[in-house]
Image (cartoon, grey):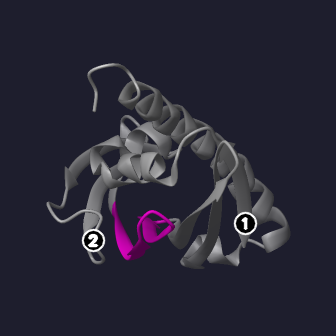
Amino acid sequence: MSHTSRFLRCTPDDVFDVLADGWSFASWVVGAARIREVDDTWPEPGSRIHHSVGLWPLLLDDTTSVLSIDRPRSIELKVRAWPTGEGMVRLECTVEEGGTRVVMTEQATDGPAKLIPRLVQDPLLDARNTEALRRLAHLAERRSAESRLPGNG
């Protein structure tokens, strides 16, 4: 199981504001090319984001669904990208002085990707998730800075 961590200069609520915006999913998830639809109930358990992965013209349509959420502490997602398989991603937010520590945990749970040895799989997931957390940080920190501007609440 891959564990990737990053410190963000914002609150857990800022992070969850981004996570709760299903239309922003392709802006921070590496490999998500576009969002086709977001369930009205996102991010409630069972709700889904309908996305495409890959590069045009070789796009595969699939979904990501919420398994559980404890806002603003954690969210667990079932990610699908067939024919490579399915996985579980968990994002956990912990308050630290000056911001939030986000830990992203991921593992393949079904399909061909599950057959890749962890010794190979974990560094690949960590590299991808390092970039995903960098993108998530950019969005959440920008949202935080904008909310502190005069006239924004």
Nearer to me, 58 or 33: 33
Residue type at mark 1 is Ser
Mark 1 nearby-residue class (10 Å; few <14, some 14–19, many ≥20): some
Q: Please tell me whether residue 121 is drawn above or below residue 68 in the rendered image.
A: above
Which x, y percent locates residue 132? 58, 44
Q: Is residue 54 magenta?
A: no
Q: Please tell me whether residue 49 is drawn above or below residue 44 in the rendered image.
A: above
Which residue position is annotated with label 1? 2
Name which residue lies at 58% across and 65% down: 92
Which x, y percent locates residue 8? 62, 42
Residue 5: tell me if it is visible: yes
Nearer to me, 102 or 100: 100
Spot the residue most to the right: 119
Report how far apart the C-alphas of labels 1 and 2 lie in the structure: 25 Å
Which residue position is annotated with label 2? 44
Name which residue lies at 85% across and 68% down: 119
The quadrant of the image that shows the C terminus is top left
Q: Please tell me whether residue 91 is drawn above or below residue 107 in the rendered image.
A: above
Image quadrant in which you'd find residue 124: bottom right
Nearer to me, 153 or 138: 153
Label 2's element?
loop
Name which residue lies at 50% across and 69% down: 74
Q: Nearer the viewer, mark 1 or mark 2?
A: 2
Image quadrant in which you'd find residue 72: bottom left
Residue type at mark 2 is Glu
Magenta segment's dominant SS is strand
Residues in magenta?
63-83
Which x, y percent locates residue 51? 32, 52
Spot the residue most to the left: 40
